[in-house]
Image: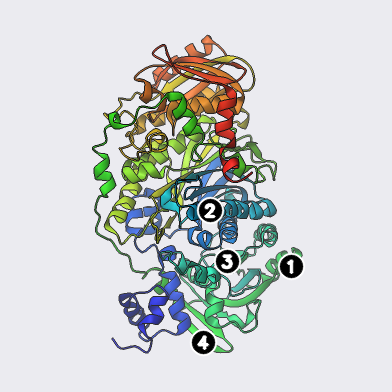
């Protein structure tokens, strides 16, 4: 097919020859330059989910949305009292690799606006971060220095934006691995609350209704950001700095208040964030969802520079902007709401009944495209799936091949590794208490707990994932991520109710990567179904690959839990005093790999990244969550902390350090697996007395769980663990605290 557009033009935008020919076929002509750019961003993986959509159908709620009216910005959970909670994860990986401060900051801003356009007030942010090694000797000195730079400036960007915008950053996680050098992962999650009778929609409606541009003026920053996010990082990273948006948290704060005020007027028909793909995405998606069209005059768009072309105005991803459809004759109410907050609100077009997005610049049509051509006709691909070499090798892992380590040395090594060490250096840079609804802060519980106004209920929120487990066994990794996130919110006393996921993988065109993605999604879907925690929203980020190779497959789970009374919340460590420790467990038979496959002990203490993680008992995990919620509501527990990375030895050490306790415990089994094996479905409980243990054991048995006393805690410091009545670990409190609390500050020069 002959065209007037050279292949290098559309390939530079991320389109291939078959896709370009499909565009010509849909239009019946050669696209204009602006139209070509619109197709490129809407058909990017970031916006169009070309490789992921077929696999995501494994999520029941997602499949229903695909077959129904289409996906909104985020899902909503009814928590009672007429209130709903909405939440979503978004990635800003590539921008953060190029410009870490602004990449992270605008990731926070974008996810807040996704929640805002549901009609919800954003009440909390969470972040999941992955970087290359920051420990000297774990990579070349220049690589370590670059990783520290990225770590420092990503954290600063999250804090700099989040602290100013007035939304608390309440929880998160950070991990490190050589495979993230050159391509860090920066995933932001936001949680919002709204009245169920005030949900906003993104579906445009009502031919003749005015289309209103809201918020900051448009500039040249972020053009083709969506395409950039759908490509592999390379040596030209610095040249892609213009693809990174620049954020203004103070403008975002005003945008939040103005939007919520405008929605209260009842004059808003539909509203959507101008996020990835900017004005293109909002005009096209709103039109497509509503089955209508839009006529837009770009001369009316507030711009920071007078000479912006139609192409630039349609593709700019300048921040703090939204698009709304107002009821005809009531646009002045919407505009007044924004002007009261000192923000721009300008009518730039009208809704039409022809299904076309028609765009003018300087009086000339620069784009005239059917909205559904850009959405419903985005091509989807499936690829060959092939198990990875690591997965096949890990089946043969023999835990007996691990070097023999002194348990005291091993525990201090684990506590002092940045993966497991305290993240206080990170979260002390974030305002966790703004809005005064945070009831349990970072580091105090297995999940953060919020006490939203207008209800006695509490919300527990957590973001979690284990890339090493997913790398070595993707399906189990997906299941385990869901199981641990559910266990974490249940440890605070909240019932796990819903999931948002962030799926970060390499190039989906590589058979082993596409297999990892497919397997991990199936694992998540299976666990979500059994645990009764549907995936209500999410994000896929592919092409996380640099000259140093692809990242580990990293599925992240954002979990929401609900408790009837926020006063029943549980910390991970008891307050000062004396008491007993019990262990509640899902019945489990360890595999031949003894819980050491894919474990932190093997990888971080022994330097061996191999083996399969244990298969979780999902029915047992559901019973465990129900037990924890019931025991917390009955006020029978003082604290609860799950055993995960590093096993029971690390869990007990964390309880000792965080609470300032001296702990003595006695475990059963073979020494190293008992101490460091990562057996799913174990939670350490603190209780007041033997009578509490007797009551809890009865409740546990009724749910098919095991529960027994394992030790004591008292005022003081230190940790003493016996295995089968033989001393295995004895460490003073100063040694534990030095390893756990100061590892990251020391590495970061603080």
Q: Secondary structure at mark 4?
A: strand
State the image coordinates of residue 12 (x, y, percent, origin top left).
41, 76
Q: Is disc 4 in contact with disc 2, using a CB cutoff of under 8 Å?
A: no
The residue singled out by tag 1 in the image is: 339
State the image coordinates of residue 423 (x, y, percent, origin top left).
57, 40
**Sequence-wise, which precedes: disc 4 or disc 1?**
1
Binning the other alpha carbons within 10 Å of mark 4 as few (below 14), some (14 to 19) or many (20 upward) gives some
The residue singled out by tag 2 in the image is: 145
In front: mark 3 or mark 2?
Answer: 2
- How far is the residue under mark 4 from the one under mark 1? 30 Å
Residue 553 left/right relative to 294: left
User: Which sits in the foreground, 217 or 419?
Assistant: 419
Binning the other alpha carbons within 10 Å of mark 1 as few (below 14), some (14 to 19) or many (20 upward) gives some
Q: Secondary structure at mark 3?
A: loop
**Sequence-wise, which precedes: disc 4 or disc 2?**
2
The residue singled out by tag 4 in the image is: 365
The residue singled out by tag 3 in the image is: 245
Quadrant assignment for the C terminus: top right
């Amino acid at each position: 097919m002959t065209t007037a557009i050279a292949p290098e033009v559309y390939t530079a935008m991320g389109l291939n020859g078959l896709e370009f020919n499909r565009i010509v076929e849909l239009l019946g002509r050669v696209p204009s330059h602006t139209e070509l750019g619109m197709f490129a961003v809407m058909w990017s993986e970031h916006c169009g989910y070309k490789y992921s959509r077929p696999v995501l159908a494994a999520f029941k709620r997602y499949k229903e949305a695909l077959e129904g009216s289409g996906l909104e910005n985020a899902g909503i959970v009814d928590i009672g009292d007429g209130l709903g909670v909405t939440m979503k994860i978004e990635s800003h990986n590539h921008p953060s690799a190029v410009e870490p401060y602004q990449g992270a900051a605008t990731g926070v801003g974008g996810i807040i606006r996704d929640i805002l356009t549901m009609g919800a007030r954003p009440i909390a942010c969470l972040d999941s971060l992955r970087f290359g090694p920051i420990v000297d000797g774990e990579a070349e000195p220049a690589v370590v220095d670059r990783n520290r730079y990225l770590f420092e400036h990503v954290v600063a960007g999250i804090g700099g934006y989040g602290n100013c915008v007035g939304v608390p950053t309440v929880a998160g996680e950070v991990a490190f691995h050589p495979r993230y050098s050159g391509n860090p992962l920066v995933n932001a999650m936001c949680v919002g609350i709204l009245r169920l009778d005030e949900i906003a929609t993104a579906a445009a409606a009502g031919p003749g209704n005015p289309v209103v541009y809201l918020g900051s003026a448009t500039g040249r920053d972020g053009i083709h950001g969506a395409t950039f996010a759908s490509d592999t990082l390379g040596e030209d990273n610095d040249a892609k700095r213009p693809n990174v948006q620049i954020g203004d948290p103070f403008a975002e704060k005003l945008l939040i208040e103005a939007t919520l005020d405008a929605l209260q007027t009842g004059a808003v028909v539909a509203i959507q964030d101008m996020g990835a793909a900017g004005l293109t995405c909002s005009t096209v998606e709103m039109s497509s969802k509503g089955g209508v069209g839009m006529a837009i005059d770009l001369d009316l768009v507030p711009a920071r520079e007078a000479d912006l072309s139609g192409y630039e105005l349609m593709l700019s991803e300048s921040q703090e902007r939204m698009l709304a459809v107002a009821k005809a004759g009531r646009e002045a109410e919407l505009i007044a709401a924004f002007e009261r907050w000192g923000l721009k609100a300008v009518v730039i077009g009208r809704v039409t009944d022809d299904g076309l997005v028609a765009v003018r610049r300087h009086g000339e049509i620069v784009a005239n495209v059917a909205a559904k051509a850009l959405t419903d006709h985005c091509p989807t691909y499936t690829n060959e799936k092939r198990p990875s070499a690591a997965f096949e090798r890990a089946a043969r892992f023999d835990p007996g091949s691990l070097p023999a380590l002194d348990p005291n040395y091993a525990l201090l090594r684990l506590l002092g590794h940045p993966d497991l060490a305290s993240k206080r250096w990170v979260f002390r840079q974030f305002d966790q208490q703004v809005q005064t609804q945070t009831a349990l802060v970072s580091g105090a519980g297995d999940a953060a707990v919020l006490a939203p106004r207008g209800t006695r209920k509490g919300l527990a929120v957590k973001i979690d994932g284990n890339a090493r487990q997913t790398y070595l066994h993707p399906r189990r990794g997906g299941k385990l991520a869901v199981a641990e996130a559910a266990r974490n919110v249940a440890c605070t006393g909240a019932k796990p109710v819903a999931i948002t996921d962030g799926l970060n993988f390499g190039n989906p065109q590589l058979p082993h990567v596409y297999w990892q993605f497919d397997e991990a999604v199936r694992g998540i879907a299976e666990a979500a179904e059994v645990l009764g925690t549907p995936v209500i929203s999410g994000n896929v980020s592919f092409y996380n690959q640099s000259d140093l190779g692809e990242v580990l497959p990293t599925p992240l789970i954002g979990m929401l839990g609900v408790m009837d009374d926020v006063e029943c919340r549980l910390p991970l460590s008891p307050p000062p005093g004396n008491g007993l420790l019990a262990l509640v467990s899902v019945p489990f038979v360890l595999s031949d790999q003894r819980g050491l496959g894919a474990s932190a002990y093997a990888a971080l203490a022994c330097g061996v990244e191999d083996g399969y993680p244990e298969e979780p008992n999902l029915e047992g995990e559901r019973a465990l969550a129900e037990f924890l919620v019931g025991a917390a509501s009955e006020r029978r527990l003082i604290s609860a902390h799950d055993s995960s990375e590093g096993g029971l030895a690390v869990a007990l050490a964390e309880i000792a350090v965080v609470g300032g306790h001296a702990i003595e415990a006695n475990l059963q089994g073979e020494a190293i697996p008992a101490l460091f094996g990562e057996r799913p479905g174990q939670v350490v409980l603190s209780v007041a007395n033997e009578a509490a243990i007797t009551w809890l054991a009865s409740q546990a048995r009724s749910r098919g769980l095991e529960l027994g006393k394992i030790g004591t805690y008292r005022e003081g410091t230190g940790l003493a663990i016996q295995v089968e009545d033989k001393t295995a670990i004895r460490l003073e409190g100063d040694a534990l605290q030095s390893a756990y609390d100061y590892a990251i500050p020391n590495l970061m020069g603080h």
